Image: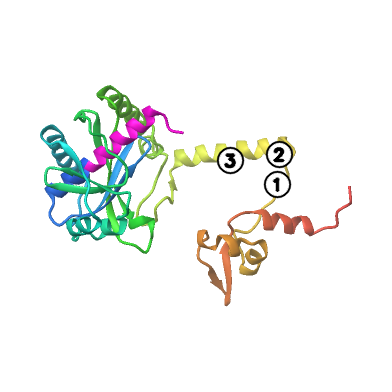
Amino acid sequence: MKTNENSGIESLRRTYAFVLAAAVSEIYSDVKLGGGGLTENGFYYDFKLPAQISLTDLPAIEEKMKELIANTAIKLSTESPEKIKSLFQDQPYKLELLNDGCAIYSLGAFRDLCEYPLSMQSLDTNSFKLSGLSGAYWKGDADGDMLTRISGAAFENEAKLKEFTLLEEDIARRDHRNLGAQLDLFSSTPEIGQGLVLWHPKGAMVRYLLEKFSQQAHIMNGYDWVYTPHIGRAELWKTSGHLGFYKDSMYSPIMIDGEEYYLKPMNCPFHIAIYQSSMKSYR
C-alpha cells in the first residue's frame, strides 16, 4: 500500500509532466500528445513533434514551464465522452487512451486527458529540472510510432532537488566511459559498433591482470579449466531449448556450408558434451 507521502510526490510529478506537455504545445505547433508517466526520481512525457529537438532545447522548455506555473492555474473539469472526442479530435494518441477513468485538466488554453489525479496545489518552480531526451515507441510497441520522450526530475522542495543534482554530477564524474577516456584505458567508435570496446595498452594490461587473477583464483579453489567454441549448430540450440524459448534474444544465425550456426547464449551444452565424452563412475 502506498503511503500518503508517496502518493503526494507521485501526484506532484504527474503534474510536472502535465505542465511539460502544456509548455511543449505552446512552443511548438502541431504537437501530437502521447502520454506522461513517472520515473524513479521524476517524470516524462512523450510527443510526436513536427521537427527533431536536442538537449539544447530543454532550457527553453523548462523556462516556459516555470512561466506557466507562475501565471496560470490548473483546473479540473468533466465532460461527456462525445465532448471529449470532439476536444481531442486532432490528437489520435489521446483518443486511443480515452476511457471512463480519464479526467480533463486545463492550464490556460491547454487541455489534457489524465487518468490519475494531479496536484492542485502551487508548484515550486525551483523543485524540478528537465534532464533527458530519448526516443520511445508508442505504447512500447516496436512496430508503433517513434515518439520523442522528454524527462525530468522533481522533488518536494529545492533542497532535495539540489541534493539529487549533486549526486547525479558525482555519478557522471565516476562514469566508466568518462574515466576510460581520461585514463586512456579504452575507447569505442560508432564505425565499429556500440558497446564494442577498443582496449588501449593501459586498459589491456588492467584486463590482463584481472583475467590472470581470476584464472589463478579458480584453479586454487579446485576448478578445472576448459575451452569451448563460440558458435554451435542450430540443432544443438534446438535440443537445449534456447531456440524454442529465447530465439528473439539471440543473435541471427551464421550460415556455414549451408548450415545454420548460432553464437552461444551460454556454455552449458558444451560442458555437458565434455562430461559425456568419457565414461563416468557411479561415484
Where 270 sits versus 11, above or below?
A: below
Nearest to N terminus: mark 2 or mark 3: 3
Q: Nearer the viewer, residue 232 or 99?
A: 99
The residue where tag 2 is placed is: 219
Left or right position of 207 against 92:
right
How far apart are labels 2 and 3 at the CA level?
12 Å
Going 29% across and 36% down the picture, which residue do you hit?
13
Residue 259 found in image quarter: bottom right
Element at label 1: loop
Residue 236 shows which numbered tag?
none
The image shows residue 235 at horizontal and vertical percentages of: 65, 69
Q: Is residue 262 visible?
A: yes
Going 16% across and 49% down the picture, which residue do you hit?
25
The residue where tag 3 is placed is: 211
The span shown in magenta is 1-18
The image shows residue 145 at horizontal and vertical percentages of: 30, 61
At label 2, which amino acid type do we have? Ile
Residue 225 shows which numbered tag?
1
At label 1, which amino acid type do we have? Trp
Q: Nearer the viewer, residue 128 or 254?
A: 128
Going 38% across and 40% down the picture, which residue do you hit?
177
How far apart are labels 2 and 1 at the CA level?
8 Å
At label 3, which amino acid type do we have? Glu
The image shows residue 88 at horizontal and vertical percentages of: 20, 57
Going 43% across and 48% down the picture, which residue do you hit?
197
Nearest to N terminus: mark 1 or mark 3: 3
Q: Pointer 2 and pointer 1: residues touching (CB < 8 Å)? A: yes
